[in-house]
Amino acid sequence: MDPVHTAHDMPESEAAAEARRLIDDWASTPVRHHPTSFRDDTVPPAFGTTAPVKQDDQRIVPAWAAGIAVASIGVGAGITGIGCGAWLVLQGLASVTLNGVLMVTLPLAGLAAAATAIGGAVSKARSAITKTVYEGPVTHHIEIHNTSTTRGAFFARTRNDIH
């Protein structure tokens, strides 16, 4: 009777012995372990002060990105508030009633009155009362010498000198 052969023309008993040898070789090689964490087994004191221990930053998101996220949430909330206010104003304008007209005109009239009052106060503050007294001889020249020169063809420039 012929012995059973494997795909590589090796008898089955030899293939099993070779497989057993490979498994034993693999099991006998040491496995290199890489530490993934550190555990400090020293017992902390029951009371008193201890030396500070550096604790690494474990945040997933950098601080600048978190700041931008918080700022964008604030801006979004502010824009939503402005949008709701605009919606309410436009709802008031959509109903053409006395209240709708007053909703638009009264704030504008108030702004116009405030601008007029501020403008009047500024103009009165600028026009200070001055009483200037001029002393000395006054001469009145009535001779006028006018010199006019024009230069250029398409883009002409005229210069008038009055002496």
Image: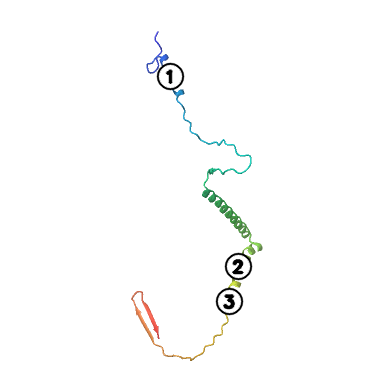
Task: Quadrant for residue 105, please give it.
Answer: bottom right
The answer to whether mark 2 and mark 1 are in CB contact below 8 A is no
Circle number at residue 125: 3
Tell me which label, 1 or 3, sits earlier in the chain.
1
Q: x, y percentage for residue 82?
A: 59, 56
Which residue bears the numbered disc 2? 111
What is the CA distance from the residue labelled 2 to the residue labelled 3? 21 Å
What is the CA distance from the residue labelled 1 to the residue labelled 3? 108 Å
Q: Is residue 98 or residue 131 the one in the foreground?
A: 131
Check the image and report above or below for 30 versus 53: above
Check the image and report above or below for 139 versus 75: below
The type of residue carrying mark 3 is Ala
The type of residue carrying mark 2 is Leu
Mark 1, residues whose alpha carbon is within 10 Å: few (<14), some, or many (≥20)?
Answer: few
The answer to whether mark 1 and mark 3 are in CB contact below 8 A is no
Quadrant occupied by the N terminus: top left
- Badge count: 3
Mark 2, residues whose alpha carbon is within 10 Å: few (<14), some, or many (≥20)?
Answer: few
Residue that extends furthest to the top in the rendered view of this protein: 1
What is the CA distance from the residue labelled 2 to the residue labelled 1? 97 Å
Q: x, y percentage for residue 9?
A: 37, 16
